[in-house]
Structures are given as structure tokens and as C-alpha cells.
Image (cartoon, helix red, strand yellow):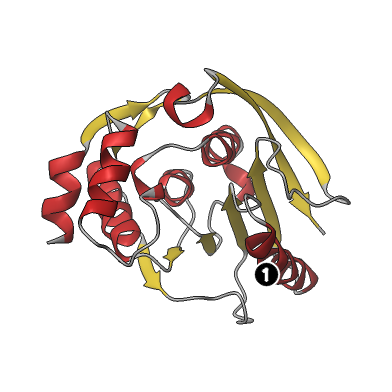
Amino acid sequence: MLSEFLHAHTRLAPVPFLPEISLWQAEEPIALWEATEAGGSSQPPPFWAFAWAGGQALARHVLDDPDLVAGRSVLDLATGSGLVAVAAARAGAAPVTANDIDPFSLAAAAANAAANDVTIETVEADLLDSDDKYGVVLAGDVFYSREMAGRVLPFLRRAAGRGSLVLVGDPGRAYLPEGLIRRAVYDVPVSEALESVAIRRTTVWQVT
């Protein structure tokens, strides 16, 4: 059912800011949002069907500097479409774990990994109270709500404290915390239907 829904509402297309990667993406964002709600789904909104600015910037950063992840274990937290996990795998990371609480997200991540001929592992769980160690933790667009930011930031700081390289991609969301280290800035093409603009200036930050 997950695969059927995915393929019925998305098409495989290159990511605007990462033409070397293709994703199953929604052509009509609002229509997909409405279809998800009409189905009476108890799952989160279909964040998995879009290449969000934070994820695009983070993926670009990893592909342009593969030494950040090559040969290291990577967690892509709140993976969404799996874009960042796919980029990490293409840059030589192993193993790569794509994590989300939405089974549709993980189905999309697996489909996108297959489309790009890379291997990732998927984990459907809330990991924010866990303390497993990864070489690198990546998180795109996770500061979009007060509740999410309040849970994600302590997890990311604990990971950094255990020695992980922790990078986040963020286009200036409302709950981006202070005290992060700026690593790179990109002008990322985005869907106007979702973001109300065609370009989002997006920063890759390091959490310490």
C-alpha cells in the first residue's frame, strides 16, 4: 500500500539543487496534502514527497565535501524523503541509517535509495531519547516547530558531546537555536507552492 500510494502521487525527477540525485517527488504539493488528509491517515503530513531547503543544502554540502562522511556511520534524523541519506551514501558513508516516525517516509527513502543505486538502512522509531553513537548525525529542516526543536536540540547536542560530527541544514525556520557554528550558505531552489518563494537562503550549521 505504501509503495502504491508513493508511485501514484509522485514522479521520479532530479532534485533542483542536486541534479546528480533523483527523488520521487510530488508535482502538485497541495493535491498530495489533500489526498493524505482525505484518506483519514493518522500519519504526519507528507513531508517525504518534497526536497526541502534544509535537506538540499545539507546534501549538497556532503556531496561537495565527501570526506565529512566517507567511511563513517551516518544517521539521517527525520529523513523525510531520504535525500540526505542518499547523498551521504553516495559520498561513501557506511552504514547510513535513515530514521523517521512516518512509515511513508521510510518507504520513500527506500525507493529513493534504490533509484539512486545506493544502500541505506531504515529505522521507524522516535530516537530522540536514545544515545546510540554515529560518526555523523545529519538533520535537515528540523526546527520548524517549538515542540520539535525542544526535543531535537538536546539529542543533537548529546550526539556532539559523544564525538559525532553533527550538521543541520536550515533555511531560517522560526525555532533555529542560537550558538551553532556556520559552515556554509546556499541559495536553494524550492517549491513556491510550499515556501511562497522560489529561492531560500539556507545555512549548514554545526552543533557542538
Q: Position of residue 4 (x, y in %)?
A: 11, 53
* Quadrant location of the N terminus in the rendered image: bottom left
Against 137, residue 6 (above or below) is above
In the rendered view, would you say 66 is above or below 64? below
Say which quarter of the image contains residue 34: top left
Which residue, as the protein is rendered here, is positioned at the far right? 179
The residue at 76%/38% (across/down) is: 183
Residue 117 in view: no
Q: Locate the C terminus and report the quarter of the image it occupies.
A: bottom right
Q: Is residue 87 above or below residue 119?
A: above
Q: Callout 1: helix, strand or loop?
A: helix
Residue that carries the numbered disc 1 in the rendered image: 151
Nearer to me, 112 or 120? 112
Q: Residue at x 73, y 64 (%)?
A: 153
Q: Position of residue 162 (x, y in %)?
A: 75, 74
Residue at x 68% of width, y 42% of height:
173
Mark 1 neighbour density, 10 Å: few (under 14) some (14–19) many (20 or more): some
Image-quadrant location for residue 163: bottom right
Q: Is residue 146 left or right of residue 71?
A: right
- Tell whether 35 sits left or right of 124: left
Relative image position of residue 69 (x, y in whole percent): 58, 52
Look at 83% across and 49% down and name the residue there.
Answer: 180
Point out residue 19 in the picture as x, y percentages from the top left corner: 39, 24
Q: Is residue 30 visible?
A: yes
